[in-house]
C-alpha cells in the first residue's frame, strides 16, 4: 500500500512539473510586471537566443492592456533593441522602459559576440510576430559598437535606425560611421542625461511614435 501511495504521489508530482515546464516554455521565461517612469504598466520577460553555439541572454519590455497583459490584439509594434555590456543592465533597461508608454517594445541584450552573431540575432528578433515590419531600431553602447555598426550595415533597410551611446569605433565600423553617421543618433557622455528625449525625437522622425 505504501508503495502504491508513493507511486501515485510521484506521478502527480511529475504531472505538475510537466505543466510548469510547458508554461515556462510558452512564456519564454520568468515574467514580472513593473511600472515605467511615465507610470504605465510593463511586462518584463526573459527572452534569450541560442546562436552559433552560444546563448545571448536578453529581457523584453512590453506595454500591457488594461488587464496587465500583452494580448495579440495589441498587434505588432516598433521595437528598440539595445546591445550593451553584459551585467551592466540598469541604464539600458531604464532607457527602454521610458519608451514603452509610446507603444514601443524594448529588448536589452548583454552582448559579447562577433559581427555575424549580431546580424543573426537581429534577424531572429526581426522575425518575431510582435515586431512591426520596417520598425526595428538598434541601440549600442561602446562595448559592442563595432560589431553592431557592422551588423547594421549588412542588414541595410531591415534596420530603421541606429543609436550609438558614447561610441568608440575603430576600423570598418568607424569608416561606416564617418560615411553615414549623420543618419545615426549619437549620444555622448554629456548628452546621456537627455538620452530619453533625444531618442524619442529620433524615433518620432522615423515614424515609430504614435
Image (cartoon, grey):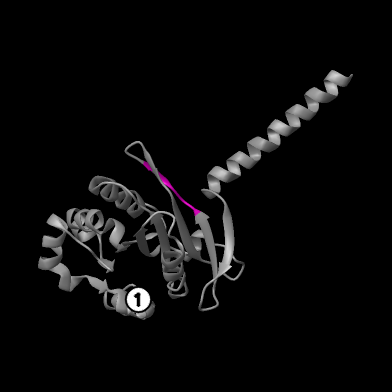
Q: Residue at x 51, y 79 (%)?
A: 38
Q: Is 175 left, or right, of 167 in this rendering?
A: left
Going by the picture, which residue comes out furthest to the right? 1
Q: How many marks?
A: 1
In magenta stretch: residue 205: no
- Towards the viewer: 126 or 166: 166
29, 176: nearer the viewer: 176
Q: From which residue to which does the magenta span run?
A: 46-50
Q: Residues within 10 Å of mark 1 (few under 14, many from 20)?
A: some
Please provide percent x and percent y for residue 174.
14, 61
Residue found at x 39% / y 53%: 128
Secondary structure of the residue carrying tag 1 is helix
Q: Where 10 sits versus 50, above or below? A: above
**Type of secondary structure dominating the magenta stretch:** strand
Which quadrant of the structure image shows residue 95? bottom left
Quadrant placement of the C terminus? bottom left
Q: Position of residue 166 (x, y in %)?
A: 28, 68
Whether residue 10 sits left or right of residue 77 in the image: it is: right
Q: Residue sitting at 10 percent across and 66 percent down?
A: 179
Which is nearer the eye, 69 or 32? Answer: 32
Residue 20 lies, with reference to residue 154, above or below; the image says above
Q: Position of residue 41 (x, y in %)?
A: 56, 70
Assign the N terminus to one quadrant of the image. Answer: top right
Q: Is residue 210 visible?
A: no
Q: Quadrant of residue 99?
A: bottom left
Q: Which residue is mark 1?
A: 192
Q: Position of residue 66 (x, y in %)?
A: 59, 71
* Side (left or right) of 6 relative to 130: right
Residue at 15% over, 65% down = 177
- 99 relative to 45 in the view: left or right: left
Amino acid at each position: 500500500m505504501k508503495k502504491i501511495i508513493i507511486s501515485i504521489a510521484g506521478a502527480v508530482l511529475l504531472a505538475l512539473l510537466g505543466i510548469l515546464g510547458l508554461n515556462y516554455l510558452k512564456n519564454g521565461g520568468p515574467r514580472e510586471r513593473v511600472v515605467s517612469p511615465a507610470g504605465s504598466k510593463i511586462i518584463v520577460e526573459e527572452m534569450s537566443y541560442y546562436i552559433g553555439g552560444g546563448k545571448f541572454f536578453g529581457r523584453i519590455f512590453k506595454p500591457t492592456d488594461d488587464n496587465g497583459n500583452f494580448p495579440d490584439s495589441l498587434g505588432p509594434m516598433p521595437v528598440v533593441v539595445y546591445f550593451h555590456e553584459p551585467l551592466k543592465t540598469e541604464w539600458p533597461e531604464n532607457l527602454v522602459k521610458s519608451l514603452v508608454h509610446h507603444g514601443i517594445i524594448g529588448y536589452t541584450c548583454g552582448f559579447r559576440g562577433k559581427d555575424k552573431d549580431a546580424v543573426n540575432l537581429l534577424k531572429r528578433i526581426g522575425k518575431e510576430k510582435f515586431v512591426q515590419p520596417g520598425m526595428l531600431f538598434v541601440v549600442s553602447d561602446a562595448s559592442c559598437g563595432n560589431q553592431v555598426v557592422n551588423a547594421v550595415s549588412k542588414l541595410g533597410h531591415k534596420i530603421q535606425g541606429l543609436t550609438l551611446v558614447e561610441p568608440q569605433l575603430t576600423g570598418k565600423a568607424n569608416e561606416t560611421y564617418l560615411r553615414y553617421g549623420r543618419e545615426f543618433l549619437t549620444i555622448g557622455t554629456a548628452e546621456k542625461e537627455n538620452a530619453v528625449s533625444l531618442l524619442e525625437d529620433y524615433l518620432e522622425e522615423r515614424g515609430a511614435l504614435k
